Amino acid sequence: MAKPLPTVLRTHLSALRMLLVMTVLLGIAYPLLVTGAGQAAFHHQANGSLVQVDGRTVGSSLLGQSFDLPKKNPDNADEQARPDPKWFQPRPSAGGYDPTASGASNLGPNSADLVKTIQQRRAAVAAFDGVAPSRVPADAVTASGSGLDPDISPAYAREQVTRVAKARGLDRDAVARLVEAHVQDPVLGFLGDARVNVLELNKALSTLR
């Protein structure tokens, strides 16, 4: 008659069997199921919500990016980026819209550095868009928590209409209508605020004649 295995050994074998079962279920089967369901039902979102123009990927509607003029000297790392007046501009980014270094500035409302930065941004945006500083919306001078916010407020989009239309030689009313067509309501009608996706708006702008 075979002797029963020691209690400690039986316990370890049971734990090993459970580990193998859970590894197969949660480490292989479940990820494959979720991935398959995502590809089948939400293919665009599951692949990063990529935005394409003429077959070329220009970004993701989930991640903000800058719309700057080409550098005068590409080899000069110290050259400051200059926003392109032909495009709608996003809100500021503490990380320079670098997806590998997302995050906020961590400066609080009582920070003198933050107050100074906001004042400088307000003056720069007002001069760039040709409006009074009092008309510059809050999201035009403050960065988001992630630093990669793809959206701006409708107020900031509307404030940029005149500058964009003039830079492109377009009818201002046509550009204004384009902005209104891209205003997205709060999620479910009450979660968050109305917003405008900058990349999607600029994609539509590129086709406006």
Image (tube, rainbow, N blue to C red):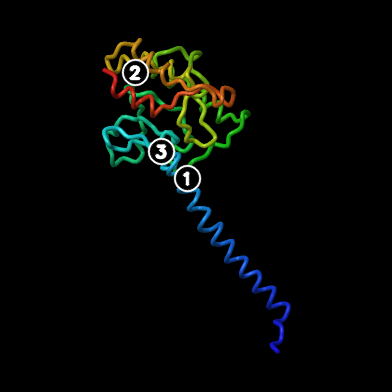
Where does the image place residue 199, in percent across and percent down from the top left? 39, 29
196 shown above or below 5: above
Q: Work out whether mark 2 precedes mark 3 in sequence or the reverse, and give the earlier one.
A: 3
Please name the residue shown 36% across and 30% down the image.
67
Which dot, 1 or 2, sits closer to the camera? 1
Q: CA distance from mark 1 to mark 3?
A: 12 Å
Q: Secondary structure at mark 3?
A: helix
Q: Work out whether mark 1 precedes mark 2 in sequence or the reverse, and give the earlier one.
A: 1
Where does the image place residue 129, in percent across and percent down from the top left? 39, 17
Near-viewer residue (41 or 101): 41
Q: Is residue 4 left or right of residue 67?
A: right
What residue sits right under mark 2 in the picture?
164
- How crowded pointer 2 is (Cα within 10 Å; few <14, some 14-19, many 20+) is rated as many
Mark drawn on residue 37:
1
Q: Work out whether mark 1 precedes mark 3 in sequence or the reverse, and give the earlier one.
A: 1
| The N terminus - image quarter | bottom right
Q: Residue lying furthest right in this view? A: 7
Which dot, 1 or 3, sits closer to the camera? 1
> The disc labelled 3 sits on which kind of residue?
His
Near-viewer residue (130 or 172): 172
> The disc labelled 2 sits on which kind of residue?
Val
Q: CA distance from mark 1 to mark 2?
A: 41 Å
109 shown above or below 181: below
Mark drawn on residue 76:
none
What residue sits right under mark 3 in the picture?
44
Q: Secondary structure at mark 1?
A: helix
Q: Secondary structure at mark 2?
A: helix
Q: Residue lying furthest bottom in this view? A: 1
Where does the image place residue 59, in percent across and percent down from the top left? 37, 36
- How crowded pointer 1 is (Cα within 10 Å; few <14, some 14-19, many 20+) is rated as few
